Structure formats: structure tokens, C-alpha cells
Amino acid sequence: MKNFEEQKRYDRARERVEELKKFYNNLTAYIIFISLLGGLNYYQNEWYNAWFIWPALGWGIGIIFHAIKAYRVNPMFDKDWEERKIRKYMEEEQNGKKQLWE
């Protein structure tokens, strides 16, 4: 039983590291490509028409949501929250409490 719990904790930690790694890769790609687009925009018209801001804003919104998920700012993205809710509903069903959706 101890090895199973330890393996489960290891798997959760590994998933967390993978999630953070994906976020950092996404952030690095964002910085590189938006910088290149900004340089291209400056080379073309010296930011007279700053069109590179539109992809920066669009991708930036995606980066913000990815950061919220990676750093677990929103509890709805947290796996522990899901597990707690599942356990709660299982206990309620076992104790015979009526569910709202029944």
C-alpha cells in the first residue's frame, strides 16, 4: 500500500512538472515569435502601423490562461479539487443523502 501511495504522489508530481514545462515552452515561443514579429513590423514601417500587437494580444490571452492552469490559480483546474468533489459525492450517496440532480 505504501508503494502505491508513493507511486501515486510521484505520478502527480511528474504531471505537475510536465504542465509547468509546457507552460515555459509556450512562454519562450511567445517571446521569440512576438519579438520577431515586432522587429519585422519595425523594419517594414517603423511601427507606423503596429500590426504585431494583434497576434501578441491574442496569443498573450492564451498565455494568461495557460499560466492560470499551470500555477493552479483557479481551483477549478486543480486535480485535488476534482478528487475532493468525487469523494464528497460518493460519501453523500453512501450515506443516503438525496442529490440535487435526482
Image (cartoon, rainbow, N blue to C red):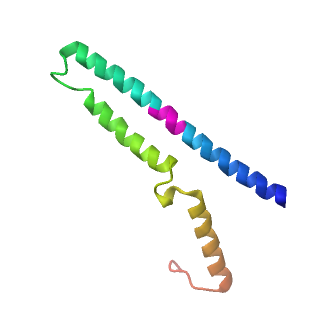
> What residue sits 68% from the left and 81% below the top?
94
Residue closest to the far left: 48
Q: Residue at x 17, y 24 (%)?
A: 49
Instruction: Give the dominant element type of the magenta stretch: helix, strand or loop.
Output: helix
Report x, y in % for residue 51. Answer: 23, 26
Q: In this view, does 36 lie above or below 92?
A: above
Above or below — where is 90 with respect to 60?
below
Q: What stretch is highlighted in magenta?
A: 22-27
Q: In this view, does 100 lie to the left or right of 96?
A: left
* Residue at image point 60% right, 74% down: 89
Q: Quadrant of the N terminus?
A: bottom right
Viewer-proximal residue, 79 or 9? Answer: 9
Q: Position of residue 5 (x, y in %)?
A: 77, 58
- Which of the pair 96/91 is nearer the observer? 91
Q: In the visual, does 92 lie left or right of 101?
A: right
Image spot of residue 71 (x, y percent): 50, 49
* Residue 93, quarter of picture: bottom right
Identify the image quadrant of residue 90: bottom right
**In the figure, residue 33 lies in which quadrant?**
top left
Horizontally, residue 56 falls left or right of residue 76, namely left
- Note whether 38 is above or below 67 in the view shown: above
Q: Is residue 26 magenta?
A: yes
